[in-house]
Image: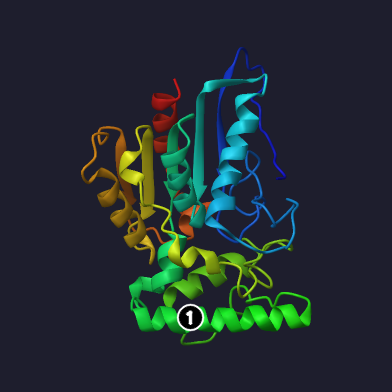
Amino acid sequence: MSSDMYVPKNAEGKLPAIAVSGPFGAVKEQCSGSIAFDPSFTGESGGQPRYMASPDINTEDFMAAVDFLSVNELVDPERIGIIGICGWGGMAINTAALDTRIKATAASTMYDMTRVNAKGYFDSEDSEEKRYEKKAALCAQRIADYKAGEYKPGGGVVDPLPEDAPFFVKDYYDYYKTDRGYHKRSLNSNGGWNVIGCESFMNQPILQYSNEIRSAVLLIHGEKAHSCYFSRDAYADMIKDSKYTGNKELYIIPDAVHTDLYDGGGKDAIPFDKLEVFFKEYLK
């Protein structure tokens, strides 16, 4: 895991710390910044095979970051938080449900990667038949990859952009394929994950135990983001039949779309003031 760690100048004593990752298929230079890590098999992180994702391994990535911070001489191990962006928002929630060392979690413009892989965008493929077809195609691809001795890339964000592309595809293109957010190591900006790279997400729901999270959670999403339903539903499930609702919040940004919370979208959409208040409260 390759990481950058930002330490404020003139800081004294043990400090609170936050581990950051995301978006899914991005690299830290694109969005999450100088206090972030690249997940396993992507960006500057090591591991083989490249461009593979896993609910288990990617949750472990966040927990490994907490390991690193917990033993760092600059960090107060009782004041550790995490931020997950896009698909890593869902991974952050899964990690918070597992890792009792985490005191505060922010999930921004969150994707539930297990849901979108199993059910398609907007749950448009939510049927046993659709899932069977998808699994059969992925299994056929595994044989083809084995025979070829290499993994077939799935392709990043479509380029050139079709005129009839859905809005969310245009939104991704505007970020990943232009000067706004392009990076040479980014999967989304270039060849994408392997075709079979996210296969294991299809039957491993990562938000299963979110209503058992005792620590604080803040979900942030753009009102006009195609993905907003992920956060709305995740929040509802998180507080359902839960004894730990007082420190959970869903915060909706008016007029913001999905990628506006990557870099502000030219309209200062990222609520840094809200994040500051949240982490100061729960990492105090």
Q: Is residue 272 above or below residue 200?
A: above
Please report the residue visible at 49 percent of the width from the left and 60 percent of the height from the top. Answer: 259
Please report the residue visible at 40 percent of the width from the left and 64 percent of the height from the top. Answer: 115
Quick one: SS at disc 1?
Answer: helix
Please report the residue visible at 65 percent of the width from the left and 50 percent of the height from the top. Answer: 28
Q: Hey, which quadrant is residue 100 in on the image?
A: top left
Q: Residue furthest top?
A: 13
Q: Residue furthest right?
A: 149
Horizontally, is 216 left or right of 54 in the view? left
Residue 36 x, y percent position in the rendering: 63, 42
Horizontally, is 187 left or right of 211 in the view? right
Q: Is residue 274 above or below residue 223?
A: above
Q: Nearer the viewer, residue 9 or 94?
A: 94
Give the residue number, with chain letter if any, for mark 1.
Answer: 134
In this orientation, does residue 214 appear?
yes
**Which quadrant: the N terminus?**
top right
Horizontally, is 70 left or right of 108 in the view? right
Q: Nearer the viewer, residue 27 or 143?
A: 143
Please report the residue visible at 23 percent of the width from the left and 34 percent of the height from the top. Answer: 243
Q: Is residue 122 above or below residue 113?
A: below
Q: Is residue 270 above or below residue 14?
A: below
Q: Callout 1: 10 Å neighbours few (<14), some, many (20+)?
A: some
**Which quadrant: the C terminus?**
top left
Q: Hey, which quadrant is residue 24 in on the image?
A: bottom right
Residue 255 x, y percent position in the rendering: 34, 59
Name the kind of residue labelled 1 in the image: Lys
In this orientation, does residue 265 appear?
no
Q: Residue furthest left?
A: 241
